[in-house]
Amino acid sequence: MIWLLACTGSEVPGGAGLLAEDYVGPGELTMEFVSDSTDTGESNDVLHLRSEDGLWTFRRGERWSDATVVGEYATELNDEGFFVGEDQVLPHRLEEGETSEHGVTVVALGELEVWYGTFPMVVRVEVTEGLPGEHAFGEGVGPVRLELVDMVWELAYYE
């Protein structure tokens, strides 16, 4: 049995062995998220996220170049987890049902379908402090679903 678990890598039930560093995404990325209200035709319902040099910049509007900046946050990955600004959004170890001392609970691990498509391995977390809401991070991708400002944003594009 131990040999079988050792051969399966990070695919252990409950998440034993999964780490935040595998779910924060690449150091530099550009993403677009849409909300449920995007179907109304309001062009402002696109949330852009650009990650560069340890900084996450959020803009809201149709195109990045003329969208309004709605927030900039330094990011840090350390031995406690992944932080956006001063707030933890992923604990270091990702085990379903575990709550970090910063109030982040891993609520589910596994497949998740968002606007962009289906991601086979996603960690869903419930954050109670700082950036409250339920957020989801895809393995090797980064955020695929964010709950911000009482809206749910799903990944629609990334590079």
Image (cartoon, helix red, strand yellow):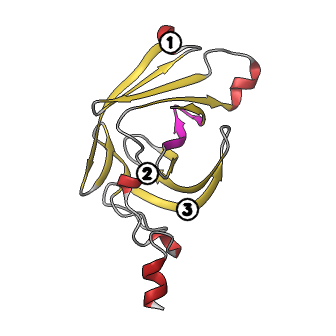
Q: Earlier in the sequence, mark 3 or mark 2?
A: 2
Look at label 2 and name its amino acid. Tyr
Q: Which residue is mark 3?
A: 108
Q: Position of residue 22 (x, y in %)?
A: 40, 54
Vertical placement of 59 versus 149: above or below? above
Stretch of the chain drawn in magenta:
142-154
Q: Position of residue 103 (x, y in %)?
A: 37, 55
- Name the residue: 51% across, 70% down: 11
Q: Earlier in the sequence, mark 1 or mark 2?
A: 2
Q: Position of residue 30 (x, y in %)?
A: 47, 28
Q: Nearer the viewer, residue 151 or 80?
A: 80
Vertical placement of 1 versus 144: above or below? below
Look at label 1 and name its amino acid. Ala
Q: In front: mark 1 or mark 2?
A: 2
- Label 1: which secondary element: loop
Q: Which residue is mark 1?
A: 67
Determine which of the numbered discs, if any, sits on residue 23 in the image.
2
Determine crowd level at label 2: few under 14, some 14-19, many 20+ residues with C-alpha closer than 10 A.
many
143 is within the stretch colored magenta: yes
Q: Nearer the viewer, residue 11 or 68?
A: 11
